[in-house]
Amino acid sequence: MQTERLCNLRALVNPLLGTDYSRNQMSSDLARLRTNGVIQRREHDNAYVFTADGQRVANFYTTVHDMLLRPLIAANMAPEPALLRHHRGPHRRLSQRRPHG
């Protein structure tokens, strides 16, 4: 069961990093997060959950990304042609927003 979950996590992280994310790298990262009190392992389970501090850190970085980094990056990109913007429509732009959960 742990292998399946770890493979799923690696499959999600690989595209974000743009490189191969090995099991050793993931184990090292999980150990580092656990040592720093960001996550904790659920008892009798091979799953991890955020600690209260970890949830605050995740919310902070998500907010910084959404409110500061994304607009700054978008400001440096060339604007897309109006015809493309029209065809993407509001439903596409709304689906790109992530909930702050």
Image (tube, helix red, strand yellow):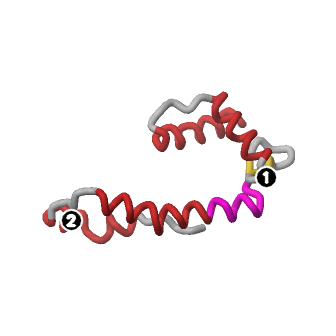
86 and 73: which one is in front? Answer: 73
51 and 2: which is toward the camera: 51
Residue 6 placement, left or right of 97: right
* Secondary structure beneath label 2: helix
Q: Quadrant of residue 44?
A: top right
Residue sitting at 47 percent across and 69 percent down? 67
> What's the residue type where badge 2 is placed?
Arg
Magenta stretch encompasses residue 57 = yes
| Label 1 – label 2 distance at C-alpha | 43 Å
The amino acid type found where label 1 is placed reads Gly
Label 1's element? loop
Residue 20's place in the image compared with 79, above or below, is above
Measured from the top left, where is residue 2 in percent x and y?
72, 36
Q: Which residues are magenta?
A: 49-59
The residue beneath circle 2 is 85
Left or right of 20, for residue 90 = left
Of labels 1 and 2, the one closer to you: 1
Q: Quadrant of the C terminus?
A: bottom right
Query: Residue at left 60%, top 41%?
Result: 9
Q: Residue at x 22, y 57 (%)?
A: 78
Q: Is residue 99 magenta?
A: no
- In the rendered picture of this protein, how many numbered marks are placed on residues? 2
Residue 38 in percent (x, y) is at 74, 53
In the image, taking residue 85 as reference, residue 98 lies left or right, namely right
Q: Which mark is residue 37?
A: 1
